[in-house]
Image (cartoon, rainbow, N blue to C red):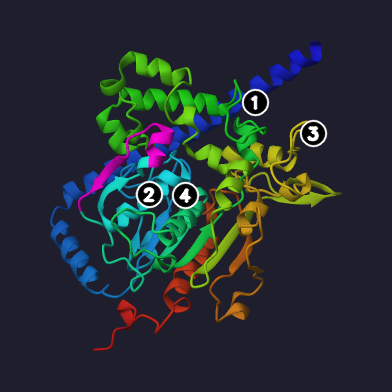
Amino acid sequence: MIIRFWVLVLQLSELFLSSIVHLLYGFYIFSSAVALDLSQGLNEWFKPNLSNGGREEELKRTESLDGLPPIVLVHGIFGFGKGRLGGLSYFAGAEKKDEHVLVPDLGSLTSIYDRARELFYYLKGGQVDYGEEHSQVYGHSQFGRVYEQGNYTEWDEDHPIHFVGHSAGAQVIRLLQQMLADKAFKGYENTSENWVLSLTSLSGAFNGTTRTYLDGIEPEDGKSLKPICLLQLCRLGVIMYDWLDIAWLKKYYNFGFDHFNLSWRKTGVSGLVDCLLGNSGPFASSDWILPDLSIQGSVRLNYHLHTFPNTFYFSYATKRTRKIIGATVPSSILGIHPLLFVRVLQMSQWRHPPDVPPPYKGYRDKDWRDNDGAVNTVSMTHPCIPFEHPNHFVVNESECQPFQPGIWYYKIVEGDHILFIVNRERAGVQFDLIYDSIFERCRKHVFRTTPPTLPNHIEH
């Protein structure tokens, strides 16, 4: 009895500490965005004459992009695209490294499925259609946001796209490609997997992560929540945020659950109570991102996802652990973000409960110990659960050229899960090395026919 009491005290202390750290980080991001907005507003106020020149420059740049496929950067969990959080960049300004980059704003906590649907309509235009059957099963509206103008309406097999996904964003792209292959978009019968020219993953969660269990997902089924956990606090906060439906605040940051109609205007107090009690909403139906990121959720998803023969695949797996006398421990103290240090340690010591069936046949704890504080390194290299996809470990990239489609080329990089996003200074020179190599590969080494003419290489 005494042991149970102290275990409970320890768990509550860890929950309190984790909550404070995550809230402080969220406040840091929000305040940084506000400060950046104020700074940009002052600059525009004192230099109004630059706006016309900026528009002319943008017009000239757009005219030079004919035939150049866009590179689409897809954010991960709790992420945001262009237009959210003011002028703050999820990819820390990496989008400025290339002439034609798109940064869509998708639901930050919505499911992999819902985000894949949103990404399609962001590019092609029109009203997001989540599908009649899916919407009925999970209890939300079939239709969502309207894109009056698609961001790349010419997208098809002759005008394919390069995709780069961070964290859960990598799985969103994989599911989107499968949907294209399955012709899953009503009114678009000519879609195919060849609409995706390349897929590059940064710390991609292909096979799930044991962090979901540490944050509160039950290891028994990979989708339900423990009664007391960090994710329960997250659930309560998100429900209240969406129910209050403060327009200016949601315009600044949105979790993406508008199609669940959680606003007080539509559900009233009774609807709020239902959501809080777990009787309705995305958390009741498991139609949100965390169940998709458990190992079981990833296995369910991966059963239907293929690696296609005409698409190029690349992956950067991150790692912040090392082995000392046979034990896996954090590889650094100062080099790991405070938000992630405790989780790096916890994930390196994770043991699947012995009284619970393993999440897949052949599961071993030791395979999942290396991690970056959010995702296990084994999960980031390439899709390998429930079956192995063609892959090649890269030591020297030049030795792999010319690249072959249909193979996952992967590297393991020393870094935590958020090293290459939000704060550019943390990564230092590594930031430029990673993104420069990604964009250069997209423009110079990955193509199905004649290499495209780059804007700065046009002959006059």
Q: How crowded is mark 4: few (under 14 residues within 10 Å), some or many (20 or more)?
A: some
Whole-percent x and y of residue 269? 33, 14
User: Does residue 22 appear left or right of residue 86 in this picture?
Assistant: right
In which quadrant of the rendered view does residue 314 lie?
Answer: bottom right
Q: Is residue 414 visible?
A: no
In the image, residue 251 above or below residue 425: above
Q: Mark 1 points at which residue?
A: 14
Amino acid beneath label 1: Glu
Depth check, mark 3 against mark 4: the one in front is 3
Callout 2 environment at 10 Å: few (<14), some (14 to 19), or many (20+)? many
Q: Quadrant of the N terminus?
A: top right
Inspect the image, locate mark 4, and give the three-letter code of the amino acid beneath it. Asn
Mark nearer the N terminus (2 vs 1): 1
Of badges 1 and 4, the one in the foreground is 1
Q: Name the residue under label 3.
A: 354
Which span is picked out in magenta? 133-148
Q: In which quarter of the image is residue 108?
A: top left
Which amino acid lies under the numbered mark 2 shown in the image of this protein? Answer: Arg
Q: Which of marks 2 and 4 is in front?
A: 2
Do residues under tags 2 and 1 come within 8 Å of each other at their CB atoms? no
Q: Can residue 373 be seen in this view?
A: yes
Indicate left or right for 296 with 82 as reference: right
**CA distance for labels 1 and 3:** 23 Å
Q: Are the residues at dot 1 and dot 3 in contact (C-beta closer than 8 Å)?
A: no
Please give the residue where the numbered disc 4 appears in the rendered image.
423
**C-alpha gap between disc 3 and disc 4:** 40 Å
The single residue placed furthest to the bottom in the displayed view is 460
Q: Which of 47 and 228 is in front in this view?
A: 228
Circle 2 residue: 117
Task: Look at 50% across and 33% down and name the residue there.
Answer: 286
